[in-house]
Amino acid sequence: GSSQLPAPQHPKIRLYNAEQVLSWEPVALSNSTRPVVYQVQFKYTDSKWFTADIMSIGVNCTQITATECDFTAASPSAGFPMDFNVTLRLRAELGALHSAWVTMPWFQHYRNVTVGPPENIEVTPGEGSLIIRFSSPFDIADTSTAFFCYYVHYWEKGGIQQVKGPFRSNSISLDNLKPSRVYCLQVQAQLLWNKSNIFRVGHLSNISCYETMADASTELQQAAAHHHHHHHH
Ligand SMILES: *[C@@H]1O[C@H](CO)[C@@H](O)[C@H](O)[C@H]1NC(C)=O
Ligand SMILES: *[C@@H]1O[C@H](CO)[C@@H](O)[C@H](O)[C@H]1NC(C)=O
Ligand SMILES: *[C@@H]1O[C@H](CO)[C@@H](O)[C@H](O)[C@H]1NC(C)=O
Ligand SMILES: *[C@@H]1O[C@H](CO)[C@@H](O)[C@H](O)[C@H]1NC(C)=O
Ligand SMILES: *[C@@H]1O[C@H](CO)[C@@H](O)[C@H](O)[C@H]1NC(C)=O
Ligand SMILES: *[C@@H]1O[C@H](CO)[C@@H](O)[C@H](O)[C@H]1NC(C)=O
């Protein structure tokens, strides 16, 4: 029988950056003292179902009492290859009893992932410029089929927002800014998967603001004006 136990409720798949986590709500049985356990299985396009265990995928998600299966923790693969078409299913088990399988919608990591903001953002103010360096939201194994490009949203404090990009580089220079002014910026990644012409727009980084350096000629003028001012007194 397939309905000896209630099935796990509200299962969801979290694909955030490199994370691949299936989680669900516990099955509570009032008439049982033993804990309900869960089994997760996976399949690829046209494959059979495999039990998610150490041998198959590198993480033990059979007979578990936890209500999540974190494929990111798998060793050595750290999850499913990001271009694979994966379907997951799970059921509750108690001794010889089990629930019906709950089958999730299929996913391809590159197609379904939520991309976070670029990380470790460092900004170096120059004379009327800002140089921005950062790291990618997560590592991509095969950069010939999937890669990040980046956009910078920036504005002079109180001014109108502008967007520069796309850039392939992790180092972007904003030039032709006014010297000695405060500019605010946010960086954003976009994941491109050219196999399917798919792109995922990432979250914006937090707003941060920087003052550009005074340029040398402005400093000279100011020094001269200052000097002039002093002579009059
Ligand atoms: C708990 O009770 C339900 C019905 O109320 C029954 O279907 C189920 O088999 C019982 N489970 C156990 C472990 O006795
Ligand atoms: C992924 O596999 C499922 C079946 O497991 C299929 O229905 C779906 O169309 C496939 N998606 C792609 C993009 O091939
Ligand atoms: C998987 O984990 C569960 C719970 O920790 C444990 O009872 C079970 O024996 C483990 N299975 C394997 C194959 O290691
Ligand atoms: C992944 O995206 C496809 C559409 O692009 C959708 O049909 C599928 O349900 C998504 N999978 C998940 C787990 O959200
Ligand atoms: C994907 O991009 C790589 C280079 O980045 C290129 O060699 C390859 O032909 C592209 N594939 C498709 C389907 O556009
Ligand atoms: C961005 O701002 C939020 C809310 O203020 C904060 O929780 C988060 O840690 C910040 N992120 C970074 C990378 O600084």
Image (tube, rainbow, N blue to C red):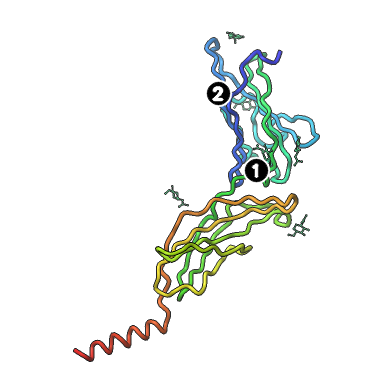
Neighbours of disc 1 within 10 Å: few (<14), some (14-19), many (20+) = some
| Picture coordinates of residue 39, whole percent (x, y) | 65, 25
| Picture coordinates of residue 126, whole percent (x, y) | 46, 73
- Residue 15 position by quadrant: top right
Q: Are marks 1 and 2 in contact (CB under 8 Å)?
A: no
Q: Is mark 1 within 8 Å of ligand 4?
A: yes
Which label's residue is closer to the chain start, 1 or 2? 2
Q: Is residue 63 left or right of residue 134?
A: right
What number is the disc on residue 112?
Answer: 1
Q: Quadrant of the C terminus?
A: bottom left
103 is higher (above) or lower (below) than 156: above
140 is higher (above) or lower (below) than 10: below
Write the residue at 64% across / 53% down.
191
Q: Is residue 32 left or right of residue 63?
A: left
- Outermost residue, front side: 160
Q: What separation in Å lies between label 1 and label 2 (alpha carbons)?
A: 25 Å
The one of 47 and 187 positioned closer to us in this rendering = 187
Q: How many marks?
A: 2
- Amino acid type of disc 1? Asn
142 is higher (above) or lower (below) than 213: above
Q: Quadrant of the N terminus?
A: top right
- Outermost residue, left side: 233
Write the residue at 58% across / 55% down.
189
What number is the disc on residue 26?
Answer: 2
The one of 183 and 77 positioned closer to us in this rendering = 183
Write the residue at 56% across / 18% down.
35
| Picture coordinates of residue 162, whole percent (x, y) | 51, 64
Front disc: 1 or 2: 1
| Picture coordinates of residue 29, whole percent (x, y) | 55, 14
- Residue 22 position by quadrant: top right
